[in-house]
Image: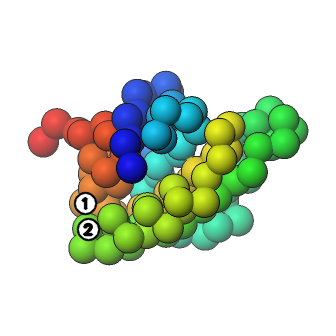
Amino acid sequence: MEIQSRLVADVPGGVALDTTLDGESISTYVVTGVTDLNAIADIVPREKVDAGADIHAANVDDVDNAQEQIDQVLENMNPGDVAVFLCADADAFGAALDLLGLPIDE
């Protein structure tokens, strides 16, 4: 799976990314400090939801499990879908960004 991302905007607690997954574009949100899936409504802009995008979400609870947790979501994505990753802490957040093709500077 080839993944590349570019930063689109800062969002409360994280970032919005434009991600290319095997040549297809998806929107990705990576946030930290949020573990409640109900918070997705506050993360994903209403216009994305109104446009009919399917939203896929997962908790990224630690660095050791990040690859598996992210892959489980990405394997079910279609072009135009939205992925939301709720990271447990700064380390999980950094791992998620790295796995999504946007490494962070230490």
Give the residue type at disc 1: Asp
Q: Which element carries disc 1, helix, strand or loop?
A: helix
Q: In the depicted view, which residue is nearer to us: 65 or 93?
A: 65
**Can see residue 81?**
yes
Q: Residue at x 55, y 35 (%)?
A: 24
Q: In x, y percent, where is residue 106? A: 12, 42
Q: In the depicted view, which residue is nearer to us: 76 or 66?
A: 76
Give the residue type at disc 2: Val
**Can see residue 88?**
no
Query: Is 22 on the left-hand or right-hand side of 94?
Result: right
Q: Residue at x 50, y 67 (%)?
A: 72
Q: In x, y percent, where is residue 2? A: 37, 42
Q: In the depicted view, which residue is nearer to us: 24 or 66?
A: 24
Would you name the residue on which mark 1 appears? 91
Q: Are marks 1 and 2 in contact (CB under 8 Å)?
A: yes
Q: Which mark is residue 63?
A: 2
Q: Residues within 10 Å of mark 2 (few under 14, many from 20)?
A: some
Q: From the viewer's perspective, is the residue at label 1 or at label 2 nearer?
A: 2
- Where is 62 relative to 80, above or below? below
